[in-house]
Image (spheres, grey):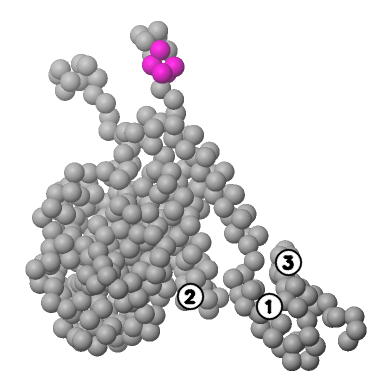
Amino acid sequence: MGLLSFFRKEKKKNTANLAKERLQIVIAHEHADNSKKSPDYLPKLRDEIVEVIRKYVHVSENDVNVNVEKGDDFDVLELNITLPENH
Amino acid sequence: MSKVIVVTSGKGGVGKTTSSAAFASGLAAKGHKTAVIDFDVGLRNLDLIMGVERRVVYDFVNVINGEATLKQALIKDKRVDNLYILPASQTRDKDALTTEGVESVINELKEDGFDYIVCDSPAGIEKGAFMALYFADEAIVVTNPEVSSVRDSDRILGILQSRSKVAEEGGTVKEHLLITRYSPDRVEGGDMLGMDDIVEILSIPLIGVIPESGSVLQASNSGVPVVMDKESKAGQAYMDVVSRFLGEDVPMRFIQAEQKKGFFKKLFG
């Protein structure tokens, strides 16, 4: 009997545990990716800001940088505009 | 106060429609005026599970487009008082459901004194699924003890808490985990994820575990919600879910592996 159950255990793997480990890893990764992702409104916000600035100064689209930095308690909206030199 | 509950999962084939039908029928059987809406535009099936497929005249999209009134489209269940079904349309137009249209139907149901509005979501994370969850106060996330289903449930939970109306207004949708097609024997044998593992991974409260059971297929074959089969374990487990949802303290059942009969018990027991 002891010998029999020894062989059975050898053959049978606990795949449920494997499933749990794999899920925990993949879900943790996906959560990390989601929190790093910048909000979907950023490109539109940037385009509109470029439009407003162009009413006064000519800037190219690459001169305007919009970014969101995640903090612990708050997020920071970072806006960086490079003005042309000979303005 | 009416409550809107979405039954959702991300993944298809896990039992959303079966669960919606059982849950809505259970709520109605307990005396609450309940409407169950099929959001699966193009692939309607709730009518079949509820056994009302031959009574469909108008559907959800007809009401949204003003081609029929809500009263004309709602099908009153003949077995349970207080239960009404709003079937999905079979149109292939993906944009048939609009936020305004869905909102007006839900508001009209609330004004008509419905206590619970159960939204049966289509699979996926496309427009239909989004529409089904957008107005939800609470969500029942249907999950099978299987890796792809658990992962998809996690995704849909993320969407619920970021893109639903309640979330947009700074609130939280109340979440309930419903595990279906559970086989305690296979869990004990180590080849199926256990309920505790799934709860740990998704970290939302468990409202019930429905055992894998032949009675679910029998119920859908005959178009009778499985809660009406008082003998079936799955039916009883669904009824427990309804009781827990209504605030009763009911212990989980059918989650232990059946006792294997020993040789002598088989002979003499």
Say yes or no: labels 3 and 2 on the same chain. Answer: no
Give coordinates of residue B217: x percent, y percent. 18, 49
Q: Which mark is residue B139?
A: none
> Residue under mark 2: which chain is it in?
B
Give coordinates of residue B171: x percent, y percent. 52, 74
Task: Please tell me which residue lies in front, B209 or A26.
Answer: A26
- How far apart in space, not on screen, are marks 2 and 1 (Cα)? 28 Å
Whether B70 is drawn above or below B187: the answer is below
Q: Amino acid at mark 3?
A: Glu
Say yes or no: labels 2 and 1 on the same chain. Answer: no
Determine crowd level at label 3: few under 14, some 14-19, many 20+ residues with C-alpha closer than 10 A. few
Disc 2 marks which residue? B166
Q: Quadrant of the N terminus of chain B?
A: bottom left
Q: Element under label 3? A: strand
Majority secondary structure of the magenta segment?
A: helix
Q: Element under label 1? A: helix
Disc 3 marks which residue? A69
Q: Amino acid at mark 1?
A: Arg
Give the residue at x 32% y 43%.
Answer: B182
Residue A65 falls left or right of residue B116: right
> Residue under mark 3: which chain is it in?
A
Q: Which mark is residue A46?
A: 1
Residue depth check, mark 2 versus mark 1: number of the one nearer the observer:
1
Q: Amino acid at mark 2?
A: Val
Say yes or no: labels 3 and 1 on the same chain. Answer: yes
Whether B201 is drawn above or below B63: the answer is above
Residue A37 picture quarter: bottom right
